[in-house]
Amino acid sequence: MTEKEKASQGMIYDANNDPELMSEQKRAKAILFEYNGLSPFQEDRKKEIITDFFGKVGQNFVIHPPFHCDYGYNIEVGDNFFANMNLVILDGAKVSIGDNVFIGPNVGIYTAGHPLDVPRRNMGLEYAYPVNIGNNVWIGAQATILPGVTIGDNAVIGAGSVVTKDIPANVLAVGNPCKVKRIITDEDQPLGKPV
């Protein structure tokens, strides 16, 4: 079994010494080097790069540079996707993002983690668990989404939150660790209150 196959099955794998994965990481860095250096007037080229780079891309998407990820092919985004600057996605496993998702600046979405035991961690071994973000989700600035998390449809993640566990649909969740604060109701529609 290859290291890439191990990663796709949630097993411990070696991303730091495996020639195949190292080559794919270098390819991603080269693609993003071009992407992040493009002029704001080169939106068509940016869309072309991301469309070819990601596993799936819906209609009408914007990702403000700089943007960084490990591989690209494990990322799937739906329609009407917006990500502000400094988005980082460590996509050792699949990252699925639904339709109408808004991501604030300096957000990290991480599928990768390392063993707690020192010997394996010092060998550079890691694991990767998928992250799923539903439809109509808003993730506030500087939030961190950790491996294996699912965020339900219509959820709002407050700025600076660290999401360590699944968040259900239709809730406002905030904090470190991120916890449900309340259900989003019709009363929230008239005003755009800060989270």
Image: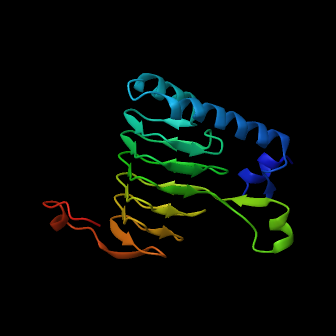
Residue 171 lies in quadrant? bottom left
Going by the image, does 89 lie left or right of 158? right
Q: Please identify the residue farthest to the left as the structure is shown.
A: 190
Q: What residue lies at 38% left-to-right and 75% top-to-bottom?
A: 180
User: Is residue 35 placed above or below 128 in the rendered structure?
Assistant: above
Q: What residue lies at 40% left-to-right and 46% top-to-bottom?
A: 84
Q: Which x, y percent locates residue 31? A: 61, 31
Q: Which x, y percent locates residue 48? A: 50, 24
User: Is residue 183 placed above or below 48 in the rendered structure?
Assistant: below
Viewer-side residue, 66 vs 128: 66
Viewer-side residue, 147 vs 67: 67
User: Is residue 50 placed above or below 107 in the rendered structure?
Assistant: above
Q: What residue lies at 75% left-to-right and 74% top-to-bottom?
A: 116
Viewer-side residue, 164 vs 150: 164
User: Is residue 103 placed above or below 152 in the rendered structure?
Assistant: above
In the rendered view, how is the structure colored?
rainbow
Can you say which quadrant of the picture contains the C terminus? Answer: bottom left
Residue 11 visible (yes or no): no
Q: Which x, y percent locates residue 113? A: 68, 63
Residue 192 visible (yes or no): yes
Going by the image, does 187 lie left or right of 93? left
Going by the image, does 123 lie left or right of 59? right
Q: Which x, y percent locates residue 93? A: 65, 51
Count all numbered tags in the image, as a single digit: 0
